[in-house]
Image (tube, coloured by chain):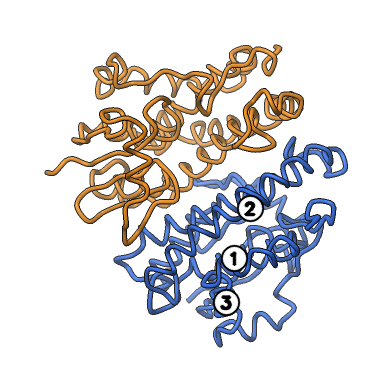
Chain colours: A orange, B blue
Amino acid sequence: MEPYDLWYWAEIPGRGEFVRLALEAKSIPYRDRARAEGSAALAKDMTRPRAEPPFAPPYLVCGDLCIAQVAAILLHLARRHELAPAERLDFANQLQLTISDAVAEAHNVHHPVATGLRYEEQKAEAARAAEAFRNERIPKFLGYFERILSQGGPWLLGEAWSYPDLSLFQLIEGLNYAFPRRMRSLAGDFPLTFALRDRVHAMPELADYLASDRRIGFSEDGIFRHYPELDPG
Amino acid sequence: MEPYDLWYWAEIPGRGEFVRLALEAKSIPYRDRARAEGSAALAKDMTRPRAEPPFAPPYLVCGDLCIAQVAAILLHLARRHELAPAERLDFANQLQLTISDAVAEAHNVHHPVATGLRYEEQKAEAARAAEAFRNERIPKFLGYFERILSQGGPWLLGEAWSYPDLSLFQLIEGLNYAFPRRMRSLAGDFPLTFALRDRVHAMPELADYLASDRRIGFSEDGIFRHYPELDPG
C-alpha cells in the first residue's frame, strides 16, 4: 500500500506521537514528513488548498484522504488496520477522547493564560494551575482508567491491546516526565494503570521503535514539560 | 424504538446541548433524565457498575449501550440516524473535534486555573486568558470554519445540514452570549460562519425545540459565561 504522510511538528512528540505509536505498533508504512523536511515544510503544507483542510497538526495524508485531530485519525486507522475490535470502536474512541482531554489539561498547566505566550510569561498562573492538576485532575483521570482495568484487563479493552492502550502509555509517560514526584506518590494507588504503562513499554511490536531515533523525547518545548517548581512533591 | 436516556447536568446547556440538538433535529426519542429527576439522580447513575463506564457527563444510554464524550456520542448517532453522509463521517468527526476544542478553550477562559475553583478565585488569570482568547483564538477558529464554508457550503459538508452544523451553531451562540462585543466586531470578517448560525437557527426541524422549555439558556453556571470585564470591546 501507499505509505501515509504524517504531518506534525518535527521537534516534539506532542500530539503526533499518539499517531506514531499506532502506526509503528502495526508496522503501517508512513513518512514523517516534517521530520524529514523540517517544520517549514509543514507550515507550507498547511496552506495547501484541500477539500477537507486540517485545523492544526497532526494530520495524515494518503491519496485523497486528509484527516486531522488525533482521535479522528486513530479511529480511521483502527477501522482500516484493526487497531481495535470493530464492535468496541465506540468505547475505544471514548477512551481516546478522555485521554485527549487529559493531554489538553496537562498542556494548560504550563500555559493557563495563552498558548501564544511563553511559560515565563504565565508562571504565577501556572503554579496555581499545577496544584489543582496534581491534586485533583491526575488522580481523577488515573482513577477512571484504573476502574476500567479493574473490570477486566489486562488491557483497556480486555484480552488484547488496542490503540487506546498506546495512548494511555504515552499519557503516563508524559505525566511521569512532567510530574515525577507526584506520579511516584500515586503509583501505589493505581497499580493496574501503571502496570499497563509497563505492559505497553514491553510490547514486542514497539521494541524497535522505542529504541530508535524515530521516538522523540519529551522536552520543555512540548505538551508535557518538567518544571520542578510545578512538581514540588 | 426504545428512547435514549441522555444524562447531563440539569441546570446548564453545557456539553449536553450538542447531543440534544442532534436528537431534536432528527426527532429521535430520548429522555432527558437529570432534567426530569434532578442532578442528584445523575450523580447516582454515574456510580452504577457498567462495562463501559463514562468518565463524565454527557452520556447516552440505550439498552446495553452506554456512550460518553460528545464527539463519540454524535458519531454514534450519526451512523445510526443519518446525521451526516456515511462517506463524510471522518470529516464530520474532525470538525466536531475542532468545535469541541473551541468549547473547551471557551471554558478555560473563565476557569484558567482550575475547574474546581470559582471564577471569583481566578479573575485576574481569567482577564489575561480572555484577552488572548478574544484576540487570537476566536478569529482562528472562525477563520477555519469560514474557509470550509467558502469552499462549498452553504453547510459545512455541502448541500445538506449535518451534525457539525448544529454544533457550530451552538458554539457561535455561546460565543455571542459570552463575548457579544467581540463577536459583533468580528461578524463582518466571517460572514459565511455567522450566516450558518442563522441558517441553523431557522431550520424547520429545530423550530419546536428552540421555542420550547427543553432548550436551556446560557448562564454564569455554564461553559459560556458573560462576564462584561472579559469582553470589554
Q: Pointer 1: residues within 10 angstroms few (<14), some, or many (20+)?
A: some
Q: Secondary structure at mark 2?
A: loop
Q: Tell us which disc is closer to us: 1 or 2.
A: 2
Residue situated furthest right in the rendering: B120
Mark 1 or 3, which is nearer the eye?
A: 3
The residue at which mark 3 appears reads as B24
Q: Which residue is mark 1?
A: B5
Q: Is residue B8 above or below residue B1?
A: above
- The residue under the point 43% across, 26% down is A12
Q: Residue furthest left?
A: A1
- Residue B216 in which image quadrant: bottom right
Which chain does tag 2 point to? B
Residue at the spot of label 2: B57
Give the Cα distance between marks 1 and 2: 12 Å
x and y percentages locating residue B57 in the rendered image: 63, 53
Instruction: State the SS at label 3.
Output: helix
Q: CA distance from mark 1 to mark 3?
A: 13 Å
What amino acid does circle 3 point to? Glu
Along the viewing direction, whichever of B110 and B88 lies nearer the viewer: B110
Chain letter for mark 3:
B
Mark carried by residue B163 = none
